[in-house]
Every structure is written in structure tokens, then in C-alpha cells.
């Protein structure tokens, strides 16, 4: 059978992304490091517990958190430090993270309507974590003279900021500004300001409200490089981004147009069809608005093909906001190479923001399992 190839259509397609995940780290409610967390996630374990936060009926709010008696900024600092060390342990040259000429940092942070989004806050978290890594690796040596020259980009866009973070990483690597990018996501809902805001909006899973999420906390990191054509490993091959008019408060219904466009764009850039995918990993957190939207979008893009295996993280680590996307990448980078518990060789991640941003990322494993 002869097959005709539309060269004009092929030329119009965006070039496929080839970002390689070289190392990863994760600190979340089910583990202080990626290997421990992956074992817990594989067993469908969680660490949900009653907290000191109270609902309007004075019932304790269930949260997903790590056992620690430190709160506020120091708590987030600890999770970022755990994550950076975890990522460094999986690297051939962990000290390269400390070299500003070799490594840039991109940080995904909560959107400006949330707490912990002040100027310089997240950049300081990363700087402190790298200083701690230097102290551990070099017996307390002081930071090098070029430490202040490090490229640090903070993207305060919440969950769907993953697409922007990956695109920013691509630009830094493509311009040869650095040879690797440390992409970090960090967030926590375990503070009074966020808790009160979510309670007022009736978005927490509490007695009397089944249409809500369980708040959590996490930090995650992946080390990204440009991939060579014949490389084997875990690769990000497509990134899609779009806007959705629908809003979780019901002021505008969602028709899943934005998420549909994002998934199709990611698949188009990766030069695969949705039917080629083995699984999808979503940020579904228990809120019906996002669950219906993602179901509608996936049904639309699959167009009669076999439905994808659906994976989630929030049902085990809670809603972790801006850390969600990087946590997904970190977890998949650990699971996909293992034949016994790999979800497949090709999948799509998709995430949504309250403000209408939608993103999708196609991830592939290439090589022997």
C-alpha cells in the first residue's frame, strides 16, 4: 500500500521538543525522597491526617503533610533542600549544580493570588538549598565568587506553569546559556491564609462538602538537558498550552476547549496521535469542575480510540499546587523505566489553573526496561 506524506503540513508543525530528564527529586507527604515516595505511591498509600486547622463547623481539616514541627518559611526551605539533595544524589556530577556557568534554575511557584509569592522569596529558597548542598559536598566551604551570577527564573503561575517552565528551560538550553536546567516546583496550602481562602470558596474536602480537595505540601525537582537523537532515557517531547474560559466558581462553564487544545498541541509537537498514548497523568484533585473538564477533553481528543489509563497523584499526596507538574515528572522518571510497574512508554500529563491556563506535556521512555 502506498502512503502519501503531506510535506507542507509536516513543515508547518512545530519542531519536536527533546528535553531529557537526567535526575529527579521529590519530597512530599509520603516520603522525604523520590525512591521512598515512589514505593508509597505504587502501593497507593497516603499520609492524610487531621490537622490543627478547623472548618467553619470547628471540625479538624484533613491534610497531607510530612511529620515535622517546623512551620512557615523554614518548612518550605526544608522541603526544597531535601529535594535538591535528592536530585543531586542521582547525578554523575552533583557539584555541577553549584556552578552558575553550567546550571540555571527555573522555579515554579504559586500564582500571585496565593501566599508565599513575594519578590525574591522562591529564589532565596533555592539559593539557600544550594548553599546547604555545597556545605555538605565541600565540608562547609563558602559559596564561590560567581554564585550571585546564577540564572534563576521564578514563574508564579501555579499548576499550569509547568508548560512555561519547560519552555523557559528549552530557551536557556537552546541559547547555550547553560548546559543543564534545574526545574523546581514548591508549594504548600498548609497555612492560615490559604486555608481560610479555600474554606470561604468552599473548595476544601470537609464535612458537608464532598466537592473539594485535601490540601498538601511538596517540593520536586528535575534536572533537564537537551537530548541527542540517539539518546535513551526519559524525554519530554511535546508541550501544549492554551486558555480556558471556564472558571471553578461556576461563573463561566467549562467546555474543555482549552485543555483539548493543549493536549492536541502537545501531541502535535511530539508528532504522535492521542491514540498512540499509553496513559495520562492528571492533576485531578477531587473537585468536580476539573474532573468533568479533563474527562470531556480526553474523550474529545481520543475520538473513539481506546480510553487511556488514568493516573493521579493528589489522591495520595494531596493538592500541592505549583509543585504538582514537577512532582509528576519526577515520579514518572522513576517509574517508567521499570518493567514491573511502568504505566507505559508514552504518556501525557495535563494540568489546569483556576485562572484558565491549561497545559499538557508528552513524555516518552526510550530504551530497555
Image: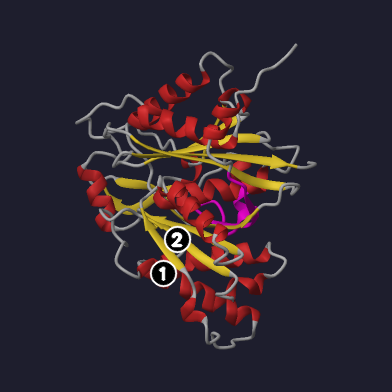
- The region drawn magenta spans 17-38
Mark 1 = which residue? 123
Q: Is residue 73 above or below residue 1?
A: below
| Labels 2 & 1 near each other (Cβ < 8 A) | yes
For mark 2, give the secondary structure. Answer: strand
Residue 86: assigned label: none
- Choose between 335 and 152: the one closer to the eye: 152
Q: Position of residue 311 (x, y in %)?
A: 55, 34
Which class describes the residues within 10 Å of circle 2: few (<14), some (14-19), or many (20+)?
A: many
Q: Which residue is mark 2?
A: 107
Judge from the rendering whether residue 203 lies leftward or rightward of residue 36; answer left or right.
left
On the image, the x and y values in percent for residue 73 come to: 37, 68
Identify which residue, 57 or 264, lies in the foreground: 264
The disc, 2 or 1, on the residue closer to the chain's N-terminal end is 2
Residue 73 among those drawn in magenta: no
Query: Distance of mark 2 from mark 1, alpha carbons?
Result: 8 Å
Amino acid at each position: 500500500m502506498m502512503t502519501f506524506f503531506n510535506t507542507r503540513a509536516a513543515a508547518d508543525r512545530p519542531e519536536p521538543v527533546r528535553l531529557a530528564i537526567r535526575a529527579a527529586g521529590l519530597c512530599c507527604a509520603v516520603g522525604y525522597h523520590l525512591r521512598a515516595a515512589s514505593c508509597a505511591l505504587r502501593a497507593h498509600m497516603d499520609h492524610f491526617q487531621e490537622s490543627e486547622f478547623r472548618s467553619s463547623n470547628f471540625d479538624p481539616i484533613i491534610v497531607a503533610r510530612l511529620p515535622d514541627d517546623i512551620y512557615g518559611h523554614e518548612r518550605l526551605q526544608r522541603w526544597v533542600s531535601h529535594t535538591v539533595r535528592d536530585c543531586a544524589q542521582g547525578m554523575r556530577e552533583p557539584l555541577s549544580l553549584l556552578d552558575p556557568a553550567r546550571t540555571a534554575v527555573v522555579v515554579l511557584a504559586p500564582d500571585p493570588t496565593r501566599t508565599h509569592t513575594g519578590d525574591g522569596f522562591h529564589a532565596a529558597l533555592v539559593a539557600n538549598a544550594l548553599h546547604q548542598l555545597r556545605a555538605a559536598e565541600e565540608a562547609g566551604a563558602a559559596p564561590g565568587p560567581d554564585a550571585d551570577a546564577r540564572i534563576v527564573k521564578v514563574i508564579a503561575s501555579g499548576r499550569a506553569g509547568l508548560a512555561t517552565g519547560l519552555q523557559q528551560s528549552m530557551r536557556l538550553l537552546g541559547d547555550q546559556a547553560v548546559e543543564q536546567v534545574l526545574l523546581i516546583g514548591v508549594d504548600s496550602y498548609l497555612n492560615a491564609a490559604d486555608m481560610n481562602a479555600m474554606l470561604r470558596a468552599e473548595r476544601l474536602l470537609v464535612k458537608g462538602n464532598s466537592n473539594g480537595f485535601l490540601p498538601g505540601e511538596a517540593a520536586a525537582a528535575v534536572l533537564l538537558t537537551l537530548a541527542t537523537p540517539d539518546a535513551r532515557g526519559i524525554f519530554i517531547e511535546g508541550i501544549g498550552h492554551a486558555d480556558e474560559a471556564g472558571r471553578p466558581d461556576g461563573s463561566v462553564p467549562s467546555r474543555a476547549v482549552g485543555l483539548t487544545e493543549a493536549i492536541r498541541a502537545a501531541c502535535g509537537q511530539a508528532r504522535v496521535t492521542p491514540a498512540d498514548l499509553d496513559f495520562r497523568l492528571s492533576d485531578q484533585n477531587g473537585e468536580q469542575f476539573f474532573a468533568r473538564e479533563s474527562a470531556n477533553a480526553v474523550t474529545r481528543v481520543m475520538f473513539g480510540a481506546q480510553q487511556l489509563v488514568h493516573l493521579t497523584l493528589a489522591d495520595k499526596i494531596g493538592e500541592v499546587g505549583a509543585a504538582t507538574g514537577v512532582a509528576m515528572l519526577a515520579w514518572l522518571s522513576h517509574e517508567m523505566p521499570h518493567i514491573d510497574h511502568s504505566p507505559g512508554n508514552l504518556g501525557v500529563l495535563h494540568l489546569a489553573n483556576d485562572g484558565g491556563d491549561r497545559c499538557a506535556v508528552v513524555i516518552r521512555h526510550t530504551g530497555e526496561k
